[in-house]
Structure formats: C-alpha cells, structure tokens
C-alpha cells in the first residue's frame, strides 16, 4: 500500500507554506539572518511541537516564521517544500501564505511575493508540480487591516488564485470579513476559508452564505449539524480535511476516531491535505499512509480522494485534464 500511495499522483488543496518550515531550515535561516531562536537544537525544537490546541500551535508557528526576512528566505522555504512534496508524488499544491504575519514584522509584501513566485515558477518548470496561490488573511486581526493588505497587493492580483481566511477561529466568525470577501469577488478572485476546525458548524454556513467560498478548509465540525451536512452535500462543497493536523491540535483524540469515514459516508466532497507538515508530523504522503492504517481504505478510495482534489485545484484546464488522465490510468 505504501508504494502505491507514494506513486499515486496526489493533490493538496490546503497547505500553509510557512507551516512547511522544517526545524533544520529554520536554524539555517536563523543563523543566516542573525536571529535568536528559543531552542538550542533541532531536536529541542521538535520536542516543543506538542500542542494543546490551535492557539498553542499558532504561537510557535508565528515565532518560527520570524527567521524569514529576505526574498531568498521565502524562495528557500517554498523550494524546500516543493522538492520534498514532489519526491513524495505530490503533483499540485494550493499554497496558503500569510502576508500580514510578515508585514507586522517589517517584511514587505514585495519580499514575500517575489520569493514565493520565483519558487513557484521554478517548481513549475523543473519539477512535475503546479502551484496555486492563496493569499490568506488572519481572522484574529482587524478586518480593515485585511482590506488594506488586499489593496496593497494590487501589483500581484493577477498572480493570485484565491484569498483565504486562517489563524485563531474561535470568536472570529466569517461575518467579520464580509467586505474583504466582497472585494476579492469583485477582483475575480476565488474564495476559501477555514471553518469548523475549532469553531462551530455555524461558521461553515456563514462562510458559504456571507463569504461565498468555494471550499471549506477543515470543516469537520459540520457533523454537529444535520443542516450543515445537508447543505455541504447538496452543494458538494469541497472540504480540505487535514487528519494529522486535527490529531496534533487535539481537534480529535486520535486518528482512529477521526470523522473522515463519517464524512465520506455522508457523501461529502472530501479531500486530504497536510496543513502545516513541519509541525504536525508529516506531509501529504504521511497523511495518506496514516489514513490507510487507521481506516483500512483500499487503493480506489485514495484514487477517489485525489480525483476530488484535482477537480477543484487552482490550475489550468489542460493541467487538470493531464492530471486526471494520469490518475485514471493507475491500476488499482
Ligand atoms: O490549521 C490552521 N488553522 C488555522 N490557521 C492556521 N494557520 C496555519 N495553520 C492553521
Ligand atoms: Zn490550515
């Protein structure tokens, strides 16, 4: 099964590039930029990655990205992940990035965008990988700031596929960001939002009704409301479910009790992603392997999950058709 999962062309729709920063690269960049880390070694950093909840993780996530200062750092961050993912059979990544987390530290949007876009261009030329760009906004910061950053990003609007909404979910409902998402729609950008990870099922409905999103990131708490499940089923809205992330952030107790099988039983449009692979114990392949072990799914099940993801990926139609043809050619 592991060999099959490695060779299966895989698509991930939910990946925070800053969450792909492995401790080894974090130390290298800290040294390069003269930044002090609160850890003495890579092992000490890894040992600290034990989280009580989403906020506990976010504290270390924002601290970790403090080593990203220059265009080259953002390029190195993204290329490091793209190469690793490509070796594991990932063929497309929709990449979230958090400009506000960098602007706050005095790192300009030009530095962030040029580093990430250079890595995307190189990956698309030299690796068998396509990359979608999702500019994410921090829901625990003011809505006006998000709108200002979207306006500031005008030189890059044509390089973006979508906007997203992430960071601390509780007490920061989608309704806070109606103006931001309306503006993004006006600009012709697709819209996605984290909802129903730690927040209630009602946030999923808000994201659909008020933000007009085409995907729900996580969404697993939809199961707490039959109405929300029915809505997701009727619309076949994609859920980007991140099993190892949910275990790591204690959204579920253990993988064996993860609601993924229940979501599939309800006929929902489920996909699998890694979220923040450097912090949650593995990338997209590891998430596939863990699901195979926990749920005993067969090869067709994984083929179907990746078909769901390919159909929704932010990529060109020819690339989508090429990837779907490759997936369908795999003998299960
Ligand atoms: O899992 C997550 N949830 C919300 N915000 C995030 N930002 C990075 N990862 C996450
Ligand atoms: Zn996420």
Image (cartoon, helix red, strand yellow):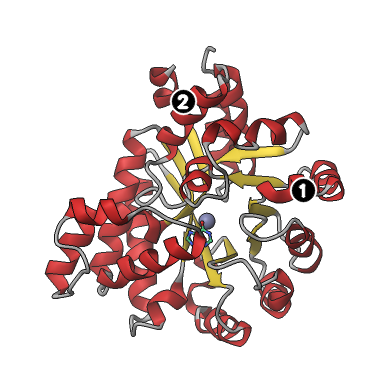
Give me the disc on residue 8.
2
Q: Which mark is residue 117?
A: none
Q: Residue at x 55, y 80 (%)?
A: 141
Q: Secondary structure at mark 2?
A: loop
For label 1, the residue is 224
10 Å crowding of disc 1: few (<14), some (14-19), many (20+): few
Task: Please report the residue visible at 31 percent of the width from the left and 34 percent of the height from the top.
Answer: 87
Who comes first in sequence, dot 2 or dot 1?
2
Q: In this picture, is 277 found above or below 45?
A: above
Report x, y in % for residue 73. Answer: 25, 66
Which of the 4 quarters of the picture holds residue 108? bottom left
Point out the image quarter for the N terminus: top left
| Residue 101 vs residue 313, the one in the foreground | 101
State which mark lies toward you, 2 or 1.
1
Ligand 2 near label 2 (Cβ, under 8 Å)? no
From the top left corner, tell me how far across and down residue 304 is, in percent: 62, 27
**Is any atom of residue 22 visible in this view?**
no
Residue density around tag 2, few if under 14, some if 14–19, many if 20 or more, within 10 Å = many
Query: Does residue 88 appear in the picture of this structure?
Result: yes
Place of residue 192 in the rendered image (x, y in percent of width and height, measured from the top left): 64, 59
* Residue ID at (60%, 37%): 258
Residue 190 quadrant: bottom right
User: Label 2 vs label 1: CA separation?
Assistant: 33 Å
- Is 14 or 219 nearer to us in this picture? 219
Instruction: Kindly state the secondary structure of the residue where label 1 is placed.
Output: helix
């Amino acid at each position: 099964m592991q060999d099959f999962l490695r060779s299966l062309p895989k698509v991930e729709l939910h990946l925070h590039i800053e969450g792909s920063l492995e401790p080894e690269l974090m130390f290298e960049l800290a040294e390069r930029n003269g930044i002090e880390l609160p850890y003495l070694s890579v092992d000490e950093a890894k040992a600290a990655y034990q989280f009580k909840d989403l906020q506990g993780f976010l504290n270390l996530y924002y601290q970790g990205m403090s080593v990203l200062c220059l265009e080259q750092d953002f390029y190195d961050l993204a290329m490091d992940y793209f190469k690793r993912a490509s070796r594991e059979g990932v063929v497309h990544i929709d990449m979230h990035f958090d400009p506000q987390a960098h602007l706050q530290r005095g790192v300009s949007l030009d530095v962030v965008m040029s580093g990430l876009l250079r890595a995307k261009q190189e990956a698309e030329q030299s690796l068998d990988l396509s990359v979608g760009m999702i500019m994410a906004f921090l829901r625990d910061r003011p809505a006006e700031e998000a709108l200002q950053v979207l306006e500031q990003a005008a030189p890059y609007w044509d390089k973006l596929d979508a906007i997203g909404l992430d960071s601390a979910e509780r007490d920061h409902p989608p309704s806070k960001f109606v103006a931001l998402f309306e503006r993004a729609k006006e600009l012709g950008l697709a819209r996605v939002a984290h909802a129903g990870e730690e927040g209630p099922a009602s946030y999923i409905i808000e994201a659909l009704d008020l933000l007009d999103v085409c995907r729900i990131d996580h969404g697993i708490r939809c199961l707490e409301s039959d109405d929300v499940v029915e809505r997701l089923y009727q619309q076949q809205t994609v859920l980007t479910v991140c099993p190892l992330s949910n275990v790591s952030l204690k959204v579920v107790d253990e993988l064996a009790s993860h609601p993924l099988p229940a979501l599939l039983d309800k006929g929902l449009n489920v996909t699998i992603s890694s979220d923040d692979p450097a912090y949650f114990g593995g990338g997209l392949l590891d998430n596939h392997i863990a699901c195979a072990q926990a749920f005993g799914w067969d090869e067709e099940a994984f083929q179907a999950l990746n078909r769901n993801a390919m159909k929704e990926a932010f990529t060109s139609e020819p690339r989508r058709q090429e990837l779907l043809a490759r997936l369908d050619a795999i003998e299960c």
